[in-house]
Image: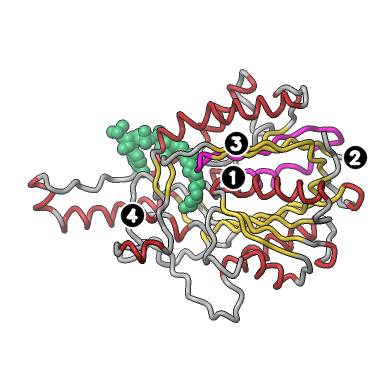
Amino acid sequence: MSELSVISGVGLWTPPESISNEELVASYNAWAERYNLDHESEIEAGTLDAKPMSSAAFIEKASGIKSRYIYKKEGVLDIDRMCPVIPERKDDELSHQAEIAVNAARKAMAAANKQASDIDAVIVSCAYTQRAYPSMAIEVQGALGIEGFGFDMLVACSAATFGIHRAHEMVVAGSAKCVLVINPELVSPQANYKDRDSHFIFGDVATAIVIERSDTANSDHVYSILGTKAKTQFSNNIRSNFGYINRAHDNDPYGADKLFQQQGRKVFKEVCPMAAEHIQSHLSDYELTPENVKRWFLHQANINMNQLISRKLLGRDPSAEEAPIVLDKYANTASAGSIIALALNHEDLVKDDLAVICSFGAGYSIGSLVIKKRG
Ligand code: CO8
C-alpha cells in the first residue's frame, strides 16, 4: 500500500442555470405531440411509430433525478431546436469547455493551498472534449499559467477516476509532483432531447482534484491514496458514433446514433454486479471489507443502481450520509458524479476514516480509489 500521493483539494463548479423534470417533460411532450400530429397518416398506416410521452414522475422514480444544471439553458426547451444555444467563440478566446474547467480548477487549487507555480501537470479527463486539438488540458494549463505539461483523456463515465489513477501514478513515479485533474463535463450538446428514454439523464458541471506528494500537502483536508483499481470490458450498450469519420461516411453527422444512446436496462443489469464485485475485490487487496468504509463516493447515474450496489456490498441499505446521492439536483454528470459527491460530503470525515471513490459506466469501465483521511 503506497501512501506517497494524496488528494489535497477538490473543486466543484456548478452552472447557474437549471432545468426541472417538469420543464423538460413539458417541452419534450409538446415536441412529441407536434411530431405525432405532423406524421398522423404514417402513424395510422403503421409505417411510423408514434413518439411516446414522457413523465416527470417516471423520471424521478426510475432515476432519482429531479433537476439538472445546464451550461446554457437557452434553446434546450425550444421545440423548434431541442439543443442548447452556445455561441461559437473566436480561436483567441478561452473556449467554453476550458472556461468551466478553469472555474473548477481554481476552486480545487484554493482548497489545496496551491498556486499555479506549485503544479506541474494538468489532465483534462471527461466524456467528450469540444475539439480534438489543441488539447483542452494545454489550453487550461495556459489559462492558469502552469508550467510543465498537460494532456486529455476520454474514458466516458470513468474519465475522472482513471484521470486520478494516472495522476497518482505520475506522483508516485516522480514524473510530476503536483497534478491537477479536471473533469469539465459539458454533456448537454451530446444529449438527445428528442429521445424520451434518455432526454432526462444528463446535466453539465465541472469538477477538479489536486493530487500531490504527501510531503508537500498542507491543506485542511488531505486524503492518502491507498490504491487504485480499474477494469474495462467492451460493450455497445452505451454508445455515441460522433466523430470526424462521419464526414467520410456521407451521413448525418448529428443523427440520433451520433448523440448519447443506451440500452439502459441492460446497462443496469450488467454493470451493478460488475461494480459491486470490483469494489469488494479492491478492498480485499488491502484486507479491508465494506464494513471498514466510512463513506462511499459512488458514480451518480441512477439512484436505484447505487442502492443495489450498496446493498450487495453492505447487506443493508446505506444511510444518506454513508453513500451520498447528488443525482436529485445534478442528474448524471458523466464522470464527475462521484467527485461532486466527494466535494460536497468530505469535510466531516476524521483522521483514518476510509472512503471509496468509484465510477462505473460506458466502455464498460469501472475505476476505484481507496482513500484515507490524513490527520
Ligand atoms: N417517461 C415515461 N415513461 C418512460 C420514460 C419516460 N421518460 N422512459 C421510459 N419509459 C417507460 C418505458 O418505455 C417502459 O415502458 P414499458 O414497460 O411499457 O416498456 C417503462 O417506462 C420502463 O422503462 P425502462 O425499463 O427502460 O426503465 P428503467 O426502470 O430501466 O429506467 C433508466 C430507465 C433510468 C435509463 C435505467 O435503466 C438506468 O438508469 N439504467 C442505467 C443506465 C446507466 O447507468 N447508464 C450510464 C449512462 S452514463 C455514461 O455511461 C456516460 C456516457 C458518456 C456521457 C454522455 C454524455 C451525454
Position above or below: 351 against 124: above
The residue beneath circle 2 is 375
Residue indicated by mark 4:
256
**Residue that numbered label 3 is attached to:** 231
Asked whether disc 4 touches disc 2, contact meaning CB atoms under 8 Å apart, the reply is no
Q: Give percent across and percent down for residue 55.
A: 35, 43
Q: Residue furthest front?
A: 248
The picture quadrant where one finds residue 286 is: top right
* Residue drawn where x is 85% and y is 33% of the image: 352
Asked whether, in this view, residue 212 is left or right of residue 97, the answer is right
Q: Amino acid at mark 1?
A: Ser
Q: Which residues are magenta?
A: 338-364
Q: Which residue is mark 1?
A: 158
Q: Is residue 61 visible?
A: no
- Callout 1: few (<14), some (14-19), or many (20+) C-alpha neighbours within 10 Å? many
Type of amino acid under label 3: Lys
User: How many residues crowd around disc 3 within 10 Å: few (fewer than 14), some, or many (20 or more)?
Assistant: some
The span from disc 2 to disc 1 (Cα, nearest Å) is 29 Å
In the image, residue 31 above or below residue 367: below
Q: Secondary structure at mark 4?
A: helix
Question: How far separated are the C-alphas under marks 2 and 3?
Answer: 31 Å
Q: Is mark 1 within 8 Å of ligand 1?
A: no
Residue 187 numbered mark, or none: none
Within the magenta stretch, is there residue 119? no
Q: Residues within 10 Å of mark 4 (few under 14, many from 20)?
A: some
Q: Position of residue 351 (x, y in %)?
A: 87, 36
67 is higher (above) or lower (below) than 357: below
Amino acid type at circle 2 is Gly
Can you tell which of label 1 and label 3 is closer to the viewer? Answer: 3
